[in-house]
Image (cartoon, rainbow, N blue to C red):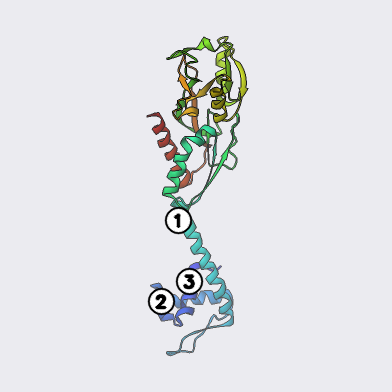
Amino acid sequence: MYELRQLATLVAVADEGSFGRAASRLGYTQSSVSQQIAVLEKTARGPLFDRPGGPKPVRITPLGAVLLQHARDLLRRADELSDGIERFRAGDSRIDIGTFQTVSNTLLPQVIRGLRDAHPGCDIRLFEEETDDPDLTGLDLMFFDGRTDDTIEDLKLLDDPYVLVARPGDFPAGPVPLETLDGLPLVAHPAICHQAVVEDFLRARAIRPQFVFRTEGNEALLAMVRAGLGAALAPRLAVLRDDPSLRLHELTPELPAREIFLLWQAGRTHSPLAAHAIELARSAAAGLTD
């Protein structure tokens, strides 16, 4: 078995042409250098250096030249390994994050910016999907609007309350009674994720809006409200920016707020980059609720 320490000694002797100068370069005693070369020669089953004696430099043998070539390559790869581990510890690695539309427009840009500023060499991969059943296969982290089973750990980031979105003047100023929604034309997201929770909440109270259009796109939802197709029930973060063409009304009683979580596989050890992303997500969520 060839040890990296012995191979480094071989390279030093070949470069310096002297056991003594190799010892000085490595910080060893000359006897230690001689012992390590002797071990290598025993392992390689042949001499690695010709030793003319006196002031003349030692010369690498043909067998030594073969071992020297591989020694340089192994030492280079060992250095690359050490460098890769140090860069990983510093956060210059890869992170795969699952997301959904609202988070992609609000929380996630702040997380990405923070990661890029702190770790310019990091590799960030994003995957956006609207789904009832979060699949964390191949992902380090995933934003999701709900809790899951015990195979997944979660961090609750914030509550995202629902509002009624309408054109100015369609409803009186102030909160709108929930029963007003019965029979009302509404545009809505598909009845998956937390939208299904909201609709179950309404049905349990015998409130049945007339859903005239469903879309996954927040902008399409708001565009249909502006066009007069109907009002919309939407999480507040879906209409975060001020828009003079829309009015947001609270509902009384309130609908169940959408809970936004950050998920990861239970028992998984985070990379430094993923750990930093979690803290950035926590900070970004706190900024949205201040």
Instruction: Report the front residue among 290 and 280.
Output: 290
Up the image or down, 192 lies above or below 118; here it is: above
Up the image or down, 257 lies above or below 99; here it is: above
Where residue 198 sits: x, y (%)?
Answer: 55, 19
The tally of labels here is: 3
Say which residue label 1 marks. Answer: 86
Instruction: Report the front residue among 146 and 129.
Output: 129
Amino acid at the residue labelled 2? Ala
Kindly report which numbered mark, 3 or 1, lies closer to the viewer in this rendering.
1
Instruction: Report the front residue among 251 and 36.
Output: 251
Residue at x 46%, y 36% (from the top left corner): 107
- The secondary element bearing badge 3 is classed as helix
Q: Residue 39 bears which disc, if any?
A: none
Where residue 178 sits: x, y (%)?
Answer: 50, 12
Say which residue label 3 marks. Answer: 8
Kindly report which numbered mark, 2 or 1, lies closer to the viewer in this rendering.
1
* Circles 2 and 1 in contact, beta carbons < 8 Å: no
Where residue 212 sits: x, y (%)?
Answer: 62, 19
Compute the Cα span from label 3 to label 2. Answer: 11 Å
| Lower position in the chain sequence, tag 3 or tag 1 | 3
Where residue 278 sits: x, y (%)?
Answer: 45, 39
Say which residue label 2 marks. Answer: 23
Quadrant of the snapshot with the N terminus: bottom right
Q: Residues within 10 Å of mark 1 (few under 14, many from 20)?
A: few
| Lower position in the chain sequence, tag 3 or tag 2 | 3
Amino acid at the residue labelled 1? Glu
- The secondary element bearing badge 1 is classed as helix
Question: Quadrant of the rendered structure where residue 21 is?
Answer: bottom left
Amino acid at the residue labelled 3? Ala
